[in-house]
C-alpha cells in the first residue's frame, strides 16, 4: 500500500513545467562511433537535481554510454540551443530533451530540422515537423477522460477551471473536443465553491485541476447523480481523500507501469524518480529501439506501431504531437482500481 501511494504521488507531482553557457558531461569527452543520440538536460542551475534524475533514468534504457551523450543546458533556452548545436556537430542524429517549451523552441530554431528532436516538455506549442512533444499534455489527459465518459453514456459535461495552468488548458481542451466527441461542454471558473451558484449538475462534472478543487467538487456533487471526472492531478492516497473521491473517474498514466520503472530506478540509483524522469526513460527507450533497428530518424519516430512507454503507449504524428494511452482509475474501498484503458488520446 505504501509503495502504491508513493507511486501515485510521484505520477501526480511535477507534470507541468514552465517555459548560458552549457557544460558537457564526462560522457561527451569520449567520442565513439555508436554515439547517435544526445540527451539535453540541466546538469547545472536550479533544475540540476531534476536533470540528474532524468540522466539516471535514461541510462536505465540506454546502457551503452558511447551511444548517448549527455549535455548540460543550464536550464535556459540559450544553453539548450548551444548544447544542441554541439551535439549535432559531434554527430548526434537525434536529440532527447530539453525540458521546457522555451528551451525546445530554441533548440528547434538552432538545429533547423537537421536532426529530429524528442522533447520532454508538455507544451504542445513547442511541436513542429521535426520536433516531437513527448510530455503528458492537458489535451491528452482531457480527451482520454472525456472519451471514456462519452463511451459510458455521458452527454453533457460541466468543466470547472480552478485557475491553475493545467486546469485552464484542460478546460479549453474539453471545450474544443465538443464536436469530435459529440458532447455538450459548459465551462465555469471556480470561485470559492466547487460549482457556480445556481448551476444544476449535468451528466458529469470535469475538474482537471489539483486535489483541493477536485475534493471540493466531490463533496458538492455527493448525492447529485452527476459523475465526477478528473485527471492525474487529482491522485491522492490520504484515506479521507479516497473516501471523498470514491467512484470518481480519473485519467492517468498506468500506475503499474510506473511502479515497475520506479523499482528499477531505485534499485540502481536510490531515491525515487518522478514523472519527468519517467519521460527521460521513455525517450531513451524509444531512441535505443530505433538505434538498434537503424531507423534513428524522423521517419522512425513516425512508425505506425508506436512505442510502449512507462507513461503510456505512444504514437507520434507528423505535426510533432503524439497520441498516448491512459488508464482510467476509480477510487473504491480505499484503493485505486484500473477499470479501463483510453486509447490514443
Image: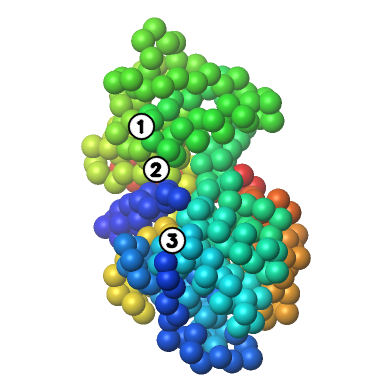
Going from N to C along the chain, the mark reached first, 3 or 2, is: 3
Q: Tags 2 and 1 in contact by the CB under 8 Å rule?
A: yes
Mark 3 to mark 2: distance in Å? 26 Å
At 42% from the left and 49% from the top, the residue drawn is: 18
Give the quarter of the figure containing the C terminus. top right
Mark 2 to mark 1: distance in Å? 9 Å
Work out whether 104 lies above or below 243: below
Mark 3 to mark 1: distance in Å? 34 Å
Residue 214 circle label: 1
Q: In the displayed structure, does residue 96 sit left or right of residue 210?
A: right
Image position, residue 91 (x, y; %): 64, 82
Q: What element does badge 2 sit on?
A: helix
Instruction: Report if residue 251 is visible in the image.
Output: yes
Image position, residue 232 (x, y; %): 43, 44
Image position, residue 25 (x, y; %): 43, 81
Q: How many marks?
A: 3
Q: In the displayed structure, does residue 215 sit left or right of residue 55?
A: left
Residue 233 circle label: 2
Work out whether 162 lies above or below 236: above
Q: How many residues crowd mark 1 within 10 Å: few (<14), some (14–19), many (20+)?
A: many
Going from N to C along the chain, the mark reached first, 3 or 1, is: 3
At 37% from the left and 60% from the top, the residue drawn is: 274
Q: How many residues crowd mark 2 within 10 Å: few (<14), some (14–19), many (20+)?
A: many
Disc 3 marks which residue?
Answer: 76
Work out whether 65 lies above or below 41: below
Q: Tags 3 and 1 in contact by the CB under 8 Å rule?
A: no
Q: Nearer the viewer, mark 3 or mark 1?
A: 3
- The quarter holding residue 307 reads bottom right
Instruction: Report if residue 288 is visible in the image.
Output: no
At 48% from the left and 89% from the top, the residue drawn is: 29
Amino acid at each position: 500500500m505504501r509503495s502504491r501511494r508513493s507511486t501515485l504521488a510521484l505520477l501526480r507531482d511535477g507534470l507541468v513545467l514552465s517555459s548560458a553557457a552549457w557544460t558537457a558531461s564526462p560522457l561527451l569527452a569520449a567520442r565513439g562511433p555508436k554515439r547517435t543520440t544526445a540527451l539535453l538536460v540541466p546538469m547545472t542551475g536550479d533544475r540540476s537535481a531534476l536533470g540528474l534524475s532524468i540522466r539516471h533514468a535514461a541510462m536505465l534504457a540506454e546502457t551503452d554510454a558511447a551511444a548517448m551523450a549527455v549535455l548540460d543546458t543550464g536550464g535556459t533556452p540559450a544553453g539548450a540551443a548551444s548544447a544542441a548545436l554541439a551535439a549535432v556537430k559531434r554527430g548526434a542524429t537525434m536529440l532527447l530533451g530539453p525540458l521546457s517549451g522555451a528551451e525546445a523552441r530554441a533548440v528547434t530554431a538552432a538545429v533547423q530540422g537537421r536532426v529530429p528532436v524528442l522533447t520532454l516538455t508538455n507544451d504542445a506549442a513547442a511541436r513542429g515537423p521535426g520536433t516531437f512533444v513527448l510530455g503528458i499534455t492537458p489535451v491528452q489527459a482531457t480527451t482520454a477522460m472525456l472519451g471514456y465518459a462519452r463511451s459510458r453514456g455521458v452527454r453533457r459535461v460541466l468543466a470547472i477551471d480552478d485557475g491553475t495552468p493545467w486546469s485552464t488548458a484542460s478546460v479549453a481542451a474539453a471545450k474544443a473536443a465538443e464536436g469530435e466527441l459529440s458532447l455538450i461542454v459548459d465551462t465555469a471558473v471556480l470561485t470559492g465553491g466547487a460549482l457556480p451558484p445556481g448551476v444544476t449538475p449535468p451528466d458529469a462534472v470535469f475538474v482537471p485541476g489539483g486535489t483541493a478543487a477536485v475534493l471540493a467538487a466531490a463533496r458538492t456533487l455527493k448525492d447529485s447523480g452527476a459523475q465526477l471526472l478528473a485527471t492525474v492531478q487529482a491522485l491522492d492516497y490520504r484515506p479521507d481523500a479516497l473516501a471523498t473521491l470514491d467512484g470518481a473517474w480519473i485519467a492517468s498514466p498506468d500506475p503499474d507501469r510506473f511502479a515497475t520503472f520506479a523499482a528499477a530506478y531505485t534499485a540502481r540509483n536510490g531515491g525515487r524518480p518522478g514523472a519527468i524522469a519517467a519521460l527521460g526513460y521513455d525517450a531513451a527507450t524509444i531512441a535505443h529501439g530505433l538505434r538498434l533497428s537503424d531507423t534513428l530518424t524522423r521517419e522512425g519516430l513516425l512508425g505506425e506501431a508506436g512505442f510502449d512507454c512507462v507513461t503510456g503507449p505512444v504514437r507520434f504524428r507528423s505535426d510533432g504531437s503524439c497520441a498516448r494511452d491512459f488508464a482510467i482509475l476509480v477510487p473504491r474501498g480505499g484503493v485505486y482500481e484500473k477499470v479501463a484503458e483510453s486509447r490514443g488520446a
